Image (cartoon, rainbow, N blue to C red):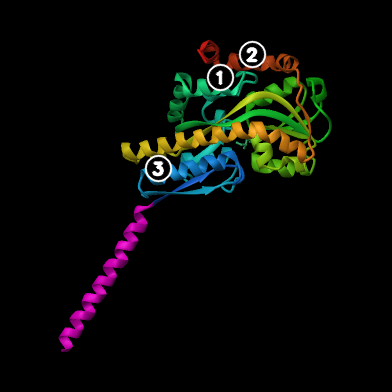
Amino acid sequence: MKDKFVRRTLALAIAGATAMAMTTLNAQAAQNVTLGHTLSDSSHYSVGADAFKETLQKLSDGEFKVTEHPSGALGGERAMIEGLQIGTVDVVITSSGPLGNFVPESYVLDLPFLFEDYEQARCVLDGEIGQELLAKMGDHNLVGLAWSENGFRHMTNSQRAVKTPGDAEGLKVRTMENKVHMEAFEQMGVHPTPMAFPEVFTALQQGTVDGQENPITVIVATKFWEVQDHLSLTGHVYSPAIVLGSPILLDGLSEEQRGWFEQAAEASAEATREEVSRLEKEGVDMLREKGMTVETDIDKAPFQEAVKPAYKIYTDQYGDEMLKRIRASDC
Ligand code: EAX
């Protein structure tokens, strides 16, 4: 009798322990993927993060679980790219802003007035040139998963309406930590102040800088209307975004698993581009409603002329091969 009781208790205990072990195993099987970006959870990057998450979780049948960290919770874009290299972050959606510091080949994309419209930019990035640049990330301890999108950048400031480079002269403008952008703005006569994105809102609020430049998407998602009165649709540069992965995570995966990450990044880029296109249409009206004055009728020629020396500075340092190929492409 006593024996039977002991045996039953033992059997129950073993069953319980096995169930617990199985639960732990299952929990371990879902590997967490940390995804970071600088924009709010209502932004086009967040739409892209959702698509990444859904696609990866679905393709891997729950083997990977994605946690999104928006609003610069993991730091600015430069810090997050460093995080990918040392493995503290797994996936980052970032503008090309600080990318050239790590992968100089990407600077060509930051040249002002390089692309005429969204169609051309997307076509180049999706084609041979874009794919080649994506593969280059691998030479710099990063994994290029897909080109996504931030949008054409426009200038905002708290001081005055800007219609010509002359109007912008003397303004203190926050730029990304990107030397091609900084040189271009310097040529325009503004005082470029490089700064990580998470610091920008406060810098504008406190008047450390007069203005900044970003696509409609970012101006909307960051509520810059609260600290900026004037918007000029200068469209001075196309701002690509990229979905980057950490080699520390991705190099350890099977080919199949890596394929899931690539497909998730492509789904992310597609969803983001759709959101950019939508906001490009609706965002300007919304910013007007929020009280910004919007200069839509900008003659781009004098801006283009003003930033020309940036091309020479770029080609002197990096050559003109890539630039020529982009210009000669069918896009
Ligand atoms: O990637 O730094 C910037 O202005 C970027 O456009 C922003 O972080 C979104």
Say if disc 2 is inside 8 Å of ligand 1: no
Q: Which mark is residue 312?
A: 2
- Prevalent SS, magenta region: helix
- Furthest residue toward bottom: 1
Label 3, label 1: how many angstroms apart (C-alpha)?
33 Å
Of residues 182 and 267, the one drawn nearer to the viewer in this rendering: 267
Q: Would you say residue 8 sits in the magenta stretch?
A: yes
Residue under the image location 82 percent in, 28 percent down: 161
Say if disc 1 is inside 8 Å of ligand 1: no
Element type at mark 1: helix
User: Could one spot residue 194 in this view of the protein?
Assistant: no
Q: Which mark is residue 67?
A: none
Q: Earlier in the sequence, mark 1 or mark 2?
A: 1
Identify the residue position indicated by label 3 in the image.
249
Identify the residue position indicated by label 1 in the image.
120
Residue 169 in the image: state x and y as whole percent. Answer: 81, 24
Crowd band around label 3 with a 10 angstrom C-alpha radius: few (<14), some (14–19), many (20+): some
Q: Is residue 211 above or below residue 300?
A: below
Specify the amino acid type for callout 3. Answer: Leu
